[in-house]
């Protein structure tokens, strides 16, 4: 039988997982400490809620809309160089922030540069992981994302300690220096072509690499089209605009974007709602609920993906079932007012939220794999990011206004549930009509 070269589905891939986790610890987790690091310094500059919101909103725009160019960057320079560039940008952004004395300087350094660096890191680390694994993708992504969870637990403690012993500039310089440690993890993202192993042509289809070695494209020569049309063709091929013609792909990323928007709104409002008069909890009790959620989230990232891989569940189906469970958990949480029931529902919420986070990009990768368009994966991830950015800016702002207008903890959770319900309806309708056809 003819021998094929396929990804190792392990081996050096676990080193890549460790590299991605290291990058996440020192970069992705830093978003969670923005308020802790910058709140007092922005206040000293005369900027309060508006300034902080502006910095975070522009950062979110830069992070998600970077998807328009991260795909071509990853395709051209490969994931390792893209991750190295992302780590350099995040570390440099925080270093520049330490010398910022105006709001516009913080926006330019943190919001624009740091956000774009995170966008590069998010896509490049996933593409690198995805290329190494066939049957163990879920647990590999779960372990890598566990790095973000660990960082979200440790970084706030570190920042609080640094701020109590140093000023803002020194603290930001130290955190910026730690962000450069992501370069070590990024350097471990070696091309999968260096570690392919021999397999037989008779193996099942899943043995094929998700990201194959690129071959020169055979296009028509320049004499068969005008310069403008050739230029557009090259751009369309570089950006993989063809995937946007697939209604099923648009349905997929819109559903993922709605779920992401609901999750983002929940994170921004949860602690405020729990310790407000709506849930009748003290600050300590609210912190306990948040800690319970974060703990179950981290444990789930490490354990559940291995079970999903073993049972060979579809990542999209797994995401859908977790989304339905999230709707139920939020609905129950909306009616809870005492500590113990809220801690229990927070624990379950952390479990189901973690499953959706782990399966976000895996669902996109699975879609590309099923349709034999694996080379479009970097740009497919980019389009997914842009969709999330658009929905957060539009629907996220509406949810924020609704929460402020009603002042109701319960209504806020139910409003967020509508987005998840919409995702479930869109996907279930597609599955029904696909089966019917």
Image: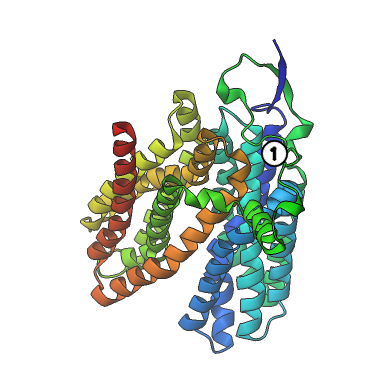
The answer to which image quadrant residue 392 occupies is bottom left
Give the camera-side residue of 174 and 88.
88
Residue matched to label 1: 16
User: Camera-side residue: 67 or 182?
Assistant: 67
Which residue occupies the foreground of this view, 9 or 215? 215
Residue 25 in view (yes/no): no
Q: Nearer the viewer, residue 198 or 174?
A: 198
Kind of element beneath mark 1:
helix
Q: Residue at x 29, y 37 (%)?
A: 432
| Residue 13 in the image: above or below residue 63 | above
Quadrant assignment, res 194: top right
State the image coordinates of residue 243 (x, y, percent, origin top left). 53, 48
Q: Is residue 407 left or right of residue 133?
A: left
Identify the residue at image location x=36%, y=62%. 270
Q: Horizontal and vertical percent for residue 387? A: 47, 59
Considering every residue shown, the one lying at the far top of the view is: 1
Q: Position of residue 97 (x, y in %)?
A: 68, 75
Q: Is residue 84 above or below residue 279?
A: above
Task: Count all numbered tags in the image, as a single digit.
Answer: 1
Rendered image coloring scheme: rainbow
Specify few, some or many for label 1: CA neighbours under 10 Å numbering under 14, 14-19, or 20 or more: many
Q: In the image, is residue 397 above or below residue 178?
A: below
Q: Residue 93's spot in the image, x, y percent?
A: 70, 69
Q: Is residue 33 visible?
A: yes
Q: Is residue 218 left or right of residue 353?
A: right
Q: Quarter holding the N terminus?
A: top right
* 382 with respect to 229 (left or right): left
Residue 399, picture quadrant? bottom left
């Amino acid at each position: 039988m003819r021998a094929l070269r396929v990804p190792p589905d392990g081996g050096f891939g676990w080193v890549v997982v460790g590299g991605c986790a290291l990058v996440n610890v020192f970069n992705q987790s830093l978003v969670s400490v923005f308020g802790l690091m910058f709140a007092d310094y922005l206040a000293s500059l005369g900027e309060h809620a508006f300034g902080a919101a502006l910095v975070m909103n522009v950062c979110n725009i830069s992070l998600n809309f970077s998807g328009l160019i991260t795909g071509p960057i990853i395709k051209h320079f490969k994931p390792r160089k893209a991750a190295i560039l992302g780590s350099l940008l995040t570390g440099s952004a925080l270093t520049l922030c330490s010398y910022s004395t105006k709001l516009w300087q913080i926006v330019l350094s943190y919001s624009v540069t740091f956000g774009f660096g995170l966008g590069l890191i998010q896509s490049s680390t996933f593409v690198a992981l995805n290329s190494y694994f066939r049957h163990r993708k879920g647990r590999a992504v779960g372990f890598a994302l566990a790095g973000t969870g660990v960082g979200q637990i440790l970084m706030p403690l570190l920042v609080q300690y640094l701020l109590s012993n140093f000023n803002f500039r020194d603290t930001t310089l130290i955190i910026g220096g730690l962000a450069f440690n992501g370069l070590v993890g990024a350097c471990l993202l070696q091309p999968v072509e260096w570690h392919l192993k021999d397999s037989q042509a008779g193996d099942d289809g899943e043995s094929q690499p998700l990201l194959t070695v690129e071959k020169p494209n055979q296009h028509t020569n320049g004499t068969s089209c005008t310069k403008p049309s050739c230029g557009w063709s090259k751009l369309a091929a570089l950006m993989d605009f063809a995937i946007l013609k697939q209604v099923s792909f648009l349905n997929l990323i819109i559903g993922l974007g709605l779920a992401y928007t609901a999750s983002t709104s929940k994170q921004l409002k949860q602690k405020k709602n729990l310790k407000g008069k709506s849930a009748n909890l003290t600050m300590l009790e609210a912190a306990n609920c948040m800690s319970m959620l974060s703990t179950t989230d981290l444990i789930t990232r490490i354990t559940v993906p291995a079970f999903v891989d073993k049972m060979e569940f579809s990542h999209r189906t797994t995401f859908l079932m977790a989304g339905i469970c999230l709707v139920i958990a939020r609905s129950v949480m909306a009616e809870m007012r005492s500590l113990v029931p809220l801690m229990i529902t927070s624990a379950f919420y952390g479990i189901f939220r973690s499953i959706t986070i782990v399966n976000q990009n895996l669902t996109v990768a699975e879609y590309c794999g099923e349709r034999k368009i694996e080379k479009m994966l970097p740009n497919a991830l980019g389009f997914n990011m842009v969709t999330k950015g658009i929905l957060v800016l539009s629907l996220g702002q509406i949810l924020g206004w609704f929460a402020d207008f009603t002042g109701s903890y319960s209504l806020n959770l139910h409003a967020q549930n509508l987005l998840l319900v919409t995702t479930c309806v869109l996907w279930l309708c597609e599955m029904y009509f696909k089966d019917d056809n």
